[in-house]
Image (cartoon, rainbow, N blue to C red):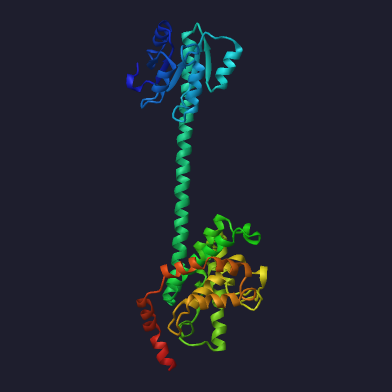
Amino acid sequence: MRASASKPTILVVDDTPDNIDLLRAVLEDDYRTKIAVNGERALKIAAGGDQPDLILLDIMMPGMSGYDVCRALKADPATAGIPVIFVTAMSEVADEQLGLALGAVDYITKPISAPIVLARIKTQLAMKQMQDFLRDQNHYLETEVERRVQEVAALQDVTIHAMASLAETRDSETGNHIRRTSHYLKALAEKVRGLPRFRDFLTDKNIELLFKTAPLHDIGKVGIPDHILLKPGRFEPHEMAIMKTHTTLGRDAILAAEHELGIEVDFLKYAKEIAYSHHEKWDGSGYPLGLAGEDIPISARLMALADVYDALISRRIYKQGMDHAQAVQIIVEGRGSHFDAEIVDAFLQIQDQFIAISNRYADGVCEIADKQRQIAPYTENIS
Protein backbone atom coordinates (compact mmCIF):
# COMPACT_ATOMS: atom_id res chain seq x y z
CA MET A 1 0.00 0.00 0.00
CA ARG A 2 1.22 3.52 -0.81
CA ALA A 3 2.09 5.93 1.93
CA SER A 4 -0.86 8.13 2.87
CA ALA A 5 0.95 11.33 1.91
CA SER A 6 1.32 10.08 -1.68
CA LYS A 7 -2.34 9.20 -2.14
CA PRO A 8 -4.66 11.46 -4.13
CA THR A 9 -7.31 13.21 -2.05
CA ILE A 10 -11.01 12.70 -2.70
CA LEU A 11 -13.60 15.08 -1.24
CA VAL A 12 -16.88 13.27 -0.49
CA VAL A 13 -19.86 15.63 -0.32
CA ASP A 14 -23.02 13.99 1.07
CA ASP A 15 -25.45 14.73 3.91
CA THR A 16 -26.21 11.07 4.72
CA PRO A 17 -23.83 9.33 7.20
CA ASP A 18 -24.42 5.87 5.70
CA ASN A 19 -23.46 7.08 2.23
CA ILE A 20 -20.36 8.79 3.63
CA ASP A 21 -19.29 5.65 5.49
CA LEU A 22 -19.80 3.50 2.40
CA LEU A 23 -17.75 5.74 0.14
CA ARG A 24 -15.04 6.12 2.75
CA ALA A 25 -14.76 2.31 2.98
CA VAL A 26 -14.55 2.01 -0.81
CA LEU A 27 -11.83 4.67 -1.03
CA GLU A 28 -9.70 4.06 2.04
CA ASP A 29 -7.15 1.68 0.51
CA ASP A 30 -6.23 3.94 -2.41
CA TYR A 31 -7.16 7.49 -1.46
CA ARG A 32 -7.17 10.06 1.28
CA THR A 33 -10.67 11.32 1.96
CA LYS A 34 -12.15 14.59 3.13
CA ILE A 35 -15.79 14.89 4.11
CA ALA A 36 -18.28 17.73 3.68
CA VAL A 37 -21.93 17.29 4.77
CA ASN A 38 -23.23 20.34 2.91
CA GLY A 39 -22.45 22.49 -0.11
CA GLU A 40 -21.10 25.47 1.78
CA ARG A 41 -18.52 23.33 3.59
CA ALA A 42 -17.60 21.62 0.32
CA LEU A 43 -16.82 24.94 -1.37
CA LYS A 44 -14.69 26.05 1.56
CA ILE A 45 -12.63 22.85 1.51
CA ALA A 46 -12.27 22.93 -2.29
CA ALA A 47 -10.94 26.49 -2.19
CA GLY A 48 -8.53 25.78 0.65
CA GLY A 49 -4.79 25.36 0.52
CA ASP A 50 -4.85 21.56 0.30
CA GLN A 51 -7.26 21.13 -2.58
CA PRO A 52 -8.81 17.74 -3.31
CA ASP A 53 -7.81 15.97 -6.51
CA LEU A 54 -11.41 14.95 -7.23
CA ILE A 55 -14.88 15.53 -5.74
CA LEU A 56 -17.66 12.96 -5.32
CA LEU A 57 -20.80 15.07 -5.08
CA ASP A 58 -24.34 14.18 -4.06
CA ILE A 59 -27.17 16.20 -5.62
CA MET A 60 -30.01 16.11 -3.09
CA MET A 61 -28.76 17.98 -0.03
CA PRO A 62 -30.34 20.61 2.25
CA GLY A 63 -29.36 24.17 1.44
CA MET A 64 -27.21 24.14 -1.68
CA SER A 65 -27.96 21.29 -4.03
CA GLY A 66 -25.14 19.42 -5.73
CA TYR A 67 -25.99 21.25 -8.93
CA ASP A 68 -25.51 24.57 -7.16
CA VAL A 69 -22.18 23.40 -5.72
CA CYS A 70 -20.98 22.30 -9.16
CA ARG A 71 -21.96 25.64 -10.67
CA ALA A 72 -20.02 27.49 -7.96
CA LEU A 73 -16.97 25.26 -8.35
CA LYS A 74 -16.81 25.77 -12.10
CA ALA A 75 -17.40 29.51 -11.81
CA ASP A 76 -14.34 29.97 -9.60
CA PRO A 77 -11.01 29.81 -11.49
CA ALA A 78 -9.38 28.48 -8.31
CA THR A 79 -11.59 25.36 -8.25
CA ALA A 80 -12.77 25.02 -11.86
CA GLY A 81 -10.10 22.43 -12.65
CA ILE A 82 -11.11 19.94 -9.95
CA PRO A 83 -12.95 16.99 -11.54
CA VAL A 84 -16.48 16.47 -10.19
CA ILE A 85 -18.31 13.13 -10.30
CA PHE A 86 -21.94 13.19 -9.25
CA VAL A 87 -22.91 10.23 -7.02
CA THR A 88 -26.69 10.35 -6.62
CA ALA A 89 -29.97 8.48 -6.44
CA MET A 90 -31.36 10.72 -9.21
CA SER A 91 -31.33 8.37 -12.18
CA GLU A 92 -33.33 10.19 -14.84
CA VAL A 93 -31.54 10.91 -18.12
CA ALA A 94 -32.39 14.62 -17.77
CA ASP A 95 -30.71 14.68 -14.35
CA GLU A 96 -27.52 13.19 -15.78
CA GLN A 97 -27.60 15.55 -18.78
CA LEU A 98 -27.88 18.56 -16.47
CA GLY A 99 -25.02 17.37 -14.27
CA LEU A 100 -22.70 16.86 -17.22
CA ALA A 101 -23.77 20.19 -18.74
CA LEU A 102 -22.74 21.93 -15.51
CA GLY A 103 -19.21 20.61 -15.91
CA ALA A 104 -19.16 17.25 -14.11
CA VAL A 105 -16.85 14.68 -15.71
CA ASP A 106 -18.99 11.66 -14.78
CA TYR A 107 -22.32 10.67 -13.25
CA ILE A 108 -22.80 7.58 -11.03
CA THR A 109 -26.22 6.47 -9.75
CA LYS A 110 -26.91 4.82 -6.42
CA PRO A 111 -26.74 2.13 -5.26
CA ILE A 112 -23.08 2.21 -6.17
CA SER A 113 -20.77 -0.59 -7.27
CA ALA A 114 -17.39 -0.25 -5.59
CA PRO A 115 -15.36 -1.50 -8.58
CA ILE A 116 -17.18 0.90 -10.93
CA VAL A 117 -16.64 3.87 -8.58
CA LEU A 118 -12.92 3.05 -8.26
CA ALA A 119 -12.51 2.54 -12.02
CA ARG A 120 -14.17 5.82 -12.87
CA ILE A 121 -12.20 7.73 -10.26
CA LYS A 122 -8.97 6.19 -11.58
CA THR A 123 -9.88 7.16 -15.15
CA GLN A 124 -10.70 10.76 -14.25
CA LEU A 125 -7.58 11.21 -12.12
CA ALA A 126 -5.45 9.87 -14.98
CA MET A 127 -7.11 12.35 -17.36
CA LYS A 128 -6.57 15.19 -14.90
CA GLN A 129 -2.93 14.21 -14.50
CA MET A 130 -2.48 14.34 -18.29
CA GLN A 131 -4.30 17.69 -18.52
CA ASP A 132 -2.12 19.10 -15.73
CA PHE A 133 0.99 17.82 -17.53
CA LEU A 134 -0.09 19.41 -20.81
CA ARG A 135 -0.95 22.66 -19.06
CA ASP A 136 2.45 22.72 -17.38
CA GLN A 137 4.14 21.93 -20.68
CA ASN A 138 2.22 24.70 -22.42
CA HIS A 139 3.16 27.13 -19.69
CA TYR A 140 6.80 26.09 -20.00
CA LEU A 141 6.69 26.49 -23.78
CA GLU A 142 5.01 29.89 -23.52
CA THR A 143 7.63 30.99 -21.01
CA GLU A 144 10.42 29.66 -23.20
CA VAL A 145 9.03 31.37 -26.29
CA GLU A 146 8.73 34.65 -24.38
CA ARG A 147 12.31 34.28 -23.18
CA ARG A 148 13.53 33.63 -26.73
CA VAL A 149 11.54 36.60 -28.05
CA GLN A 150 13.14 38.82 -25.43
CA GLU A 151 16.56 37.48 -26.38
CA VAL A 152 15.93 38.25 -30.06
CA ALA A 153 14.69 41.75 -29.20
CA ALA A 154 17.76 42.33 -27.04
CA LEU A 155 19.99 41.07 -29.87
CA GLN A 156 18.30 43.48 -32.26
CA ASP A 157 18.86 46.36 -29.85
CA VAL A 158 22.51 45.42 -29.36
CA THR A 159 23.01 45.10 -33.12
CA ILE A 160 21.50 48.50 -33.81
CA HIS A 161 23.41 50.10 -30.96
CA ALA A 162 26.67 48.62 -32.18
CA MET A 163 26.07 49.78 -35.75
CA ALA A 164 24.98 53.25 -34.66
CA SER A 165 28.03 53.50 -32.42
CA LEU A 166 30.20 53.12 -35.51
CA ALA A 167 28.82 56.42 -36.76
CA GLU A 168 29.45 58.00 -33.36
CA THR A 169 33.12 57.01 -33.49
CA ARG A 170 33.46 59.01 -36.71
CA ASP A 171 31.28 61.94 -35.74
CA SER A 172 30.86 62.53 -32.03
CA GLU A 173 28.00 64.96 -32.66
CA THR A 174 25.76 62.10 -33.71
CA GLY A 175 25.41 60.61 -30.22
CA ASN A 176 22.56 62.72 -28.88
CA HIS A 177 21.43 63.56 -32.40
CA ILE A 178 20.43 59.96 -33.05
CA ARG A 179 18.64 59.81 -29.71
CA ARG A 180 16.70 62.99 -30.32
CA THR A 181 15.74 62.15 -33.89
CA SER A 182 14.52 58.70 -32.85
CA HIS A 183 12.18 60.26 -30.30
CA TYR A 184 11.08 63.01 -32.71
CA LEU A 185 10.22 60.36 -35.31
CA LYS A 186 8.22 58.31 -32.82
CA ALA A 187 6.28 61.38 -31.64
CA LEU A 188 5.43 62.30 -35.24
CA ALA A 189 4.41 58.74 -36.08
CA GLU A 190 2.07 58.54 -33.10
CA LYS A 191 0.52 61.87 -34.05
CA VAL A 192 -0.20 61.07 -37.71
CA ARG A 193 -1.12 57.40 -37.28
CA GLY A 194 -4.83 58.22 -37.19
CA LEU A 195 -4.80 59.95 -40.57
CA PRO A 196 -6.11 57.84 -43.49
CA ARG A 197 -2.84 58.00 -45.46
CA PHE A 198 -0.82 56.62 -42.55
CA ARG A 199 -3.26 54.42 -40.62
CA ASP A 200 -2.47 51.10 -42.27
CA PHE A 201 1.29 51.49 -42.04
CA LEU A 202 1.75 53.06 -38.62
CA THR A 203 0.76 50.12 -36.44
CA ASP A 204 2.13 49.75 -32.91
CA LYS A 205 4.64 47.21 -34.19
CA ASN A 206 5.86 49.38 -37.06
CA ILE A 207 6.17 52.47 -34.89
CA GLU A 208 8.31 50.49 -32.47
CA LEU A 209 10.45 49.22 -35.35
CA LEU A 210 10.87 52.76 -36.69
CA PHE A 211 11.94 53.99 -33.27
CA LYS A 212 14.33 51.08 -32.89
CA THR A 213 15.99 51.40 -36.30
CA ALA A 214 16.00 55.21 -36.67
CA PRO A 215 19.47 55.49 -35.07
CA LEU A 216 20.89 53.91 -38.24
CA HIS A 217 19.77 56.76 -40.51
CA ASP A 218 23.31 58.17 -40.78
CA ILE A 219 25.21 54.89 -40.54
CA GLY A 220 26.59 55.56 -44.06
CA LYS A 221 28.70 58.41 -42.73
CA VAL A 222 31.25 55.83 -41.61
CA GLY A 223 32.24 55.65 -45.27
CA ILE A 224 32.76 59.39 -45.73
CA PRO A 225 36.42 60.55 -45.61
CA ASP A 226 37.38 62.48 -42.48
CA HIS A 227 38.44 65.60 -44.37
CA ILE A 228 34.84 65.92 -45.61
CA LEU A 229 32.87 64.51 -42.69
CA LEU A 230 34.67 66.70 -40.16
CA LYS A 231 35.04 69.82 -42.28
CA PRO A 232 33.98 72.88 -40.25
CA GLY A 233 33.01 75.04 -43.21
CA ARG A 234 30.74 74.86 -46.25
CA PHE A 235 31.28 71.94 -48.62
CA GLU A 236 32.63 72.46 -52.11
CA PRO A 237 30.41 70.94 -54.82
CA HIS A 238 32.60 67.87 -55.21
CA GLU A 239 32.67 67.43 -51.44
CA MET A 240 28.89 67.67 -51.24
CA ALA A 241 28.60 65.02 -53.93
CA ILE A 242 30.72 62.71 -51.81
CA MET A 243 28.78 63.59 -48.64
CA LYS A 244 25.50 62.71 -50.37
CA THR A 245 26.72 59.17 -50.92
CA HIS A 246 26.25 58.43 -47.21
CA THR A 247 22.62 57.52 -47.95
CA THR A 248 23.63 54.81 -50.40
CA LEU A 249 26.54 53.69 -48.24
CA GLY A 250 24.19 53.29 -45.27
CA ARG A 251 21.64 51.27 -47.22
CA ASP A 252 24.36 49.11 -48.74
CA ALA A 253 25.98 48.46 -45.35
CA ILE A 254 22.73 47.04 -44.05
CA LEU A 255 22.24 45.02 -47.24
CA ALA A 256 25.75 43.63 -46.86
CA ALA A 257 25.00 42.55 -43.30
CA GLU A 258 21.85 40.78 -44.48
CA HIS A 259 23.80 39.13 -47.30
CA GLU A 260 26.28 37.72 -44.80
CA LEU A 261 23.38 36.27 -42.81
CA GLY A 262 21.83 34.86 -45.97
CA ILE A 263 18.37 36.24 -45.14
CA GLU A 264 16.46 39.50 -45.32
CA VAL A 265 16.02 40.73 -41.76
CA ASP A 266 12.52 42.11 -41.21
CA PHE A 267 13.45 44.52 -38.44
CA LEU A 268 16.06 46.19 -40.69
CA LYS A 269 13.62 46.86 -43.54
CA TYR A 270 12.81 50.34 -42.26
CA ALA A 271 16.44 51.00 -41.38
CA LYS A 272 17.27 50.60 -45.08
CA GLU A 273 14.41 52.89 -46.09
CA ILE A 274 15.38 55.58 -43.61
CA ALA A 275 19.11 55.45 -44.34
CA TYR A 276 18.58 55.58 -48.10
CA SER A 277 15.70 58.04 -48.46
CA HIS A 278 15.63 60.46 -45.54
CA HIS A 279 17.17 63.20 -47.73
CA GLU A 280 14.48 62.89 -50.39
CA LYS A 281 12.14 65.89 -50.65
CA TRP A 282 8.42 65.99 -51.27
CA ASP A 283 8.87 68.00 -54.51
CA GLY A 284 11.45 65.58 -55.91
CA SER A 285 14.50 67.82 -55.42
CA GLY A 286 16.20 65.60 -52.83
CA TYR A 287 18.65 62.73 -53.13
CA PRO A 288 19.77 60.05 -53.93
CA LEU A 289 16.95 59.18 -56.36
CA GLY A 290 14.94 62.38 -56.55
CA LEU A 291 11.81 60.62 -55.32
CA ALA A 292 8.69 62.77 -54.90
CA GLY A 293 5.46 62.65 -52.90
CA GLU A 294 4.05 59.26 -52.00
CA ASP A 295 6.97 57.50 -53.68
CA ILE A 296 9.07 58.45 -50.66
CA PRO A 297 8.62 55.82 -47.92
CA ILE A 298 6.64 57.06 -44.92
CA SER A 299 9.53 56.07 -42.66
CA ALA A 300 11.88 58.37 -44.60
CA ARG A 301 9.35 61.23 -44.67
CA LEU A 302 9.08 61.14 -40.90
CA MET A 303 12.85 61.02 -40.47
CA ALA A 304 13.33 63.89 -42.94
CA LEU A 305 11.49 66.33 -40.70
CA ALA A 306 13.02 64.94 -37.50
CA ASP A 307 16.52 65.16 -38.96
CA VAL A 308 16.16 68.68 -40.35
CA TYR A 309 14.63 70.05 -37.16
CA ASP A 310 17.48 68.69 -35.09
CA ALA A 311 20.10 69.96 -37.52
CA LEU A 312 18.58 73.44 -37.35
CA ILE A 313 18.46 73.73 -33.55
CA SER A 314 21.77 72.01 -32.83
CA ARG A 315 24.98 73.85 -32.23
CA ARG A 316 27.87 72.70 -34.36
CA ILE A 317 31.50 73.74 -34.44
CA TYR A 318 30.80 75.68 -37.63
CA LYS A 319 27.47 77.25 -36.56
CA GLN A 320 25.23 78.25 -33.68
CA GLY A 321 21.96 76.43 -33.24
CA MET A 322 18.76 78.26 -34.13
CA ASP A 323 16.07 78.83 -31.59
CA HIS A 324 12.92 76.74 -31.85
CA ALA A 325 10.83 79.48 -33.48
CA GLN A 326 13.36 79.96 -36.29
CA ALA A 327 13.49 76.21 -36.93
CA VAL A 328 9.70 76.04 -37.02
CA GLN A 329 9.56 78.85 -39.56
CA ILE A 330 11.96 77.05 -41.90
CA ILE A 331 10.02 73.80 -41.61
CA VAL A 332 6.74 75.61 -42.32
CA GLU A 333 8.32 77.18 -45.40
CA GLY A 334 9.19 73.66 -46.55
CA ARG A 335 5.61 72.40 -46.16
CA GLY A 336 4.62 70.71 -49.41
CA SER A 337 8.04 71.22 -50.99
CA HIS A 338 10.63 69.69 -48.67
CA PHE A 339 8.23 67.90 -46.35
CA ASP A 340 4.93 66.02 -46.48
CA ALA A 341 2.36 68.69 -45.57
CA GLU A 342 0.43 66.51 -43.14
CA ILE A 343 3.61 65.60 -41.28
CA VAL A 344 4.42 69.31 -40.94
CA ASP A 345 0.92 69.94 -39.61
CA ALA A 346 1.42 67.18 -37.05
CA PHE A 347 4.77 68.67 -36.06
CA LEU A 348 3.14 72.03 -35.41
CA GLN A 349 0.63 70.38 -33.09
CA ILE A 350 3.29 68.63 -30.98
CA GLN A 351 5.99 71.28 -30.83
CA ASP A 352 6.07 71.02 -27.05
CA GLN A 353 7.08 67.36 -27.33
CA PHE A 354 9.96 68.28 -29.66
CA ILE A 355 11.15 70.92 -27.22
CA ALA A 356 10.97 68.46 -24.32
CA ILE A 357 12.95 65.87 -26.28
CA SER A 358 15.61 68.37 -27.32
CA ASN A 359 16.01 69.47 -23.70
CA ARG A 360 16.14 65.93 -22.37
CA TYR A 361 18.86 64.86 -24.79
CA ALA A 362 20.69 68.16 -25.11
CA ASP A 363 24.33 68.18 -26.22
CA GLY A 364 26.71 68.97 -23.39
CA VAL A 365 29.45 71.55 -23.43
CA CYS A 366 32.02 68.79 -23.00
CA GLU A 367 30.77 67.02 -26.10
CA ILE A 368 31.20 70.16 -28.19
CA ALA A 369 34.67 70.73 -26.76
CA ASP A 370 35.61 67.16 -27.65
CA LYS A 371 34.40 67.81 -31.16
CA GLN A 372 36.54 70.93 -31.42
CA ARG A 373 39.62 68.97 -30.39
CA GLN A 374 38.72 66.18 -32.81
CA ILE A 375 38.59 68.41 -35.89
CA ALA A 376 41.45 70.78 -34.91
CA PRO A 377 44.02 69.05 -37.16
CA TYR A 378 41.76 69.52 -40.16
CA THR A 379 41.00 73.17 -39.45
CA GLU A 380 44.75 73.83 -39.14
CA ASN A 381 45.41 72.20 -42.48
CA ILE A 382 42.65 74.19 -44.15
CA SER A 383 43.88 77.47 -42.76
In the image, residue 380 sits, relative to residue 14, either above or below, namely: below
**Residue 243, image x and y in percent?**
54, 81
Q: Point out residue 95 in the picture as x, y percentages from the top left corner.
A: 58, 13
Quadrant placement of the N terminus: top left
When asked about the image quadrant of residue 30, the answer is top left
Give the farthest residue toward the bottom.
383
Q: Quadrant of residue 266?
A: bottom right
State the residue in front, 248 or 53.
53
Using the image, determine if residue 369 lies above or below residue 91.
below
Residue 221 makes an appearance in the image: no
Q: Quadrant of the C terminus?
A: bottom left
**Quarter where residue 173 is shown:** bottom left
Residue 54 horizontal side relative to residue 249, left or right: left
Is 322 drawn above or below residue 252 in the view shown?
Answer: below
Q: Nearer the viewer, residue 321 or 264?
A: 321
Q: Is residue 128 above or below residue 343?
A: above
User: How many numbered badges does the structure rendering display?
Assistant: 0
> Can residue 36 be seen in the rendering of this structure?
yes
Give the x, y percent position of residue 263.
Answer: 56, 60
Rendered location of residue 231, percent (x, y): 46, 85
